[in-house]
Image (spheres, coloured by chain):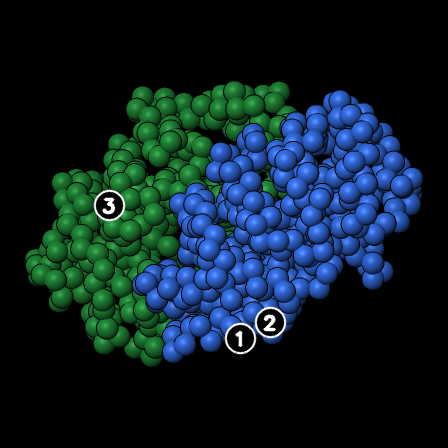
Chain colours: A green, B blue
Amino acid sequence: MDTLHLDTINSIDYPIYFDNSIDQLVNFIKTGNYSRFFILTDENTAQHCLPLVKEKLGDIDNYDIIEINAGEESKDIDFCIGIWKMLIDFGADRKSLMVNLGGGVISDLGGFAASTFKRGIDFVHVPTTLLSQVDASVGGKTGIDIDSIKNIIGTFTQPKAVFIAYDFLKTLPERQVLSGLAEMLKHGLIVDADYWNQLKNSDLTFPAVELIYHSIEIKNRVVIEDPKENGIRKSLNFGHTVGHAVETYSILKDDGTALSHGEAIAIGMICEAWLSHKKIGLSKAELNEIVDVITSLYPKYLLEESANAELYALMQKDKKNQNGKINCTLLTQIGQYSIDNICTEAELSESLAFYATL
Amino acid sequence: MDTLHLDTINSIDYPIYFDNSIDQLVNFIKTGNYSRFFILTDENTAQHCLPLVKEKLGDIDNYDIIEINAGEESKDIDFCIGIWKMLIDFGADRKSLMVNLGGGVISDLGGFAASTFKRGIDFVHVPTTLLSQVDASVGGKTGIDIDSIKNIIGTFTQPKAVFIAYDFLKTLPERQVLSGLAEMLKHGLIVDADYWNQLKNSDLTFPAVELIYHSIEIKNRVVIEDPKENGIRKSLNFGHTVGHAVETYSILKDDGTALSHGEAIAIGMICEAWLSHKKIGLSKAELNEIVDVITSLYPKYLLEESANAELYALMQKDKKNQNGKINCTLLTQIGQYSIDNICTEAELSESLAFYATL
């Protein structure tokens, strides 16, 4: 595996490896002068990805494995406390390293736990899902949830390195691939119309590695320019104001129909494309194009009008808001984002109504 | 109050105000363009300090008060979660400000809660104890406890400003003043023999503001040079390896004789001065001088030999250790620190035995 011959991307003070990335990880550990390291994993990555990592580690044995349950529920502060306590029990010191082997939950949670343990130990990401490869593993955001409010607590802390293993994606169910694809589509929509056109004309059931590479390049460019999200980085929030609320709503509903992150962001992008058309000039033709591409990929989710009040309440808890106003990133055209658009409750409700008609 | 006419000290990107400091705080709030602010306080500062702050705030009313119980127990992660949830309920956004009005517990806990809420909101310190004025409020360390392990979780995050109100010290019981004094003595011992001599010849029942100013200057100089504690900042750990263990031990004992931070650090400084004499050449005369000054100020604490194993176990959990070895900052002479001295269990036990003979 891992013979991709793609260049290493340089992010803020750290490399993102594509080529022979698990060998690169082992080399990083060997040369890093760490007293001990800890592999954070869940039951899925423990089964599908950890064996290869262990094999490559060979006779290196100064590590412990911390396994958590797969799923967003594990990002709750209670699980984070559990990880901190395990690090204490395992005798982790300031020269310890955390290796986050998994999807976005693992990298967000492991990154936060590491960035605050003894005021910060080093960590690296080995993202194993498409979503975490193109999104969570790049940009230095860590985060955990409280009372199901996503990433309400976190830090901006860069990993020491990211290791992208394309082969791990082959173990993913299709729904997980689609979840990551939503962020890739977003990358095109916000800053790169050519990339959007390339994506919409590709077979997206399993995106080619070059597309993944391109998405990471886009995200990396954005976060390097604006690490603390004061300006251009807000472009990445397109689809996420409505999307996060819909995601949390579907989880809280707890009826077995919880949406994946990408499925929720897909809905959010449709609603926010509609808002873009209504408020800041996205053309009808481009709105239709966005809706067509997204609805051809993602299943319809039933959102009754009676859910609107709860969705709006969730949006009000969004970190991006200021002075209690709902703040959206929208599009003036495909490939051109616009930040800090205040949307009213009525407008947001209308956008949800638009989605319901599709 | 507050007409001290002492210069503002410039720390890492933020000012430390001495002169008319509560007026400066109000001015900071007025000009800071914050959507809302939150005053974190405990029942003591709510009674003795908050009324003056409220009076000076006048008709400014875009704030909420978060009151916690006084004492180290409030630094536990559970209380931190409580603060995060209150910030959520109060609708805190990224343009909110946390005002930490209190001692070290308030500044450590409030600083950590703020530095991680929505990945970081601004905070300022208004330290109300001598200890927090000369120690916790300068240097950008935030921290909370888990299972009584002090500051095991935290961040390095600088406040936006610090407001030193000397008059607040007049409300403190003598024992609290002594607690801060230990850190001041330490500042002299590690880097400034002249200051040590000045202190030992002063009336220390209520230190003059110029002494406090000098201590803050010393600490500030150290942390500016080494914010992340890779070198000189470790000098500040003198007395803290043994001291922290003794402090935690006395709290866990839970028999009503818990030591204050300064009382514990006083013991730690005696033990570590003894280690300095035994291991790296601190003269017998200077050891005796240190012991005399400290024992004349602080009451004796009974540490049975049977406590040594527990104390050693606590020292092993110290953040400063690497590879499981106990790492102490010692003195080659008064005014000259030496970092990274490995001490064995036998040496540490002997140092405790020395303290017991005094």
Q: Quarter of the image for the N terminus of chain A: give it.
A: top left
Q: Please name whichever residue, A13 or B123, is drawn nearer the observer in this view of the structure.
A: B123
Identify the amino acid type marked 1: Pro
**Residue B116 placement (x, y as % from top left):** 47, 54
Residue type highlighted by circle 2 = His
Q: Which residue is mark 3?
A: A187
Counting every numbered tag in the picture gives 3
Rounded to the nearest angstrom, the CA distance separating label 2 from label 1 is 7 Å
Most foreground residue, A317 or B55: B55
Residue for point 29% across, 33% down: A213
Q: Which chain contains the residue that carries disc 2?
A: B
Q: Based on the displayed image, in which of its 4 quarters is residue A173 positioned? A: top left
Name above or below for residue B228 compared with residue B281: below
Label 3 crowd (10 A; few <14 / some 14-19 / many >=20): many
From this viewpoint, is residue A332 visible? Answer: yes
Residue at point 61%, 22% (across, down): A60
Dot in front, 3 or 1: 1
**Amino acid under disc 3:** His
Residue mark closest to the camera, 2 vs 3 = 2
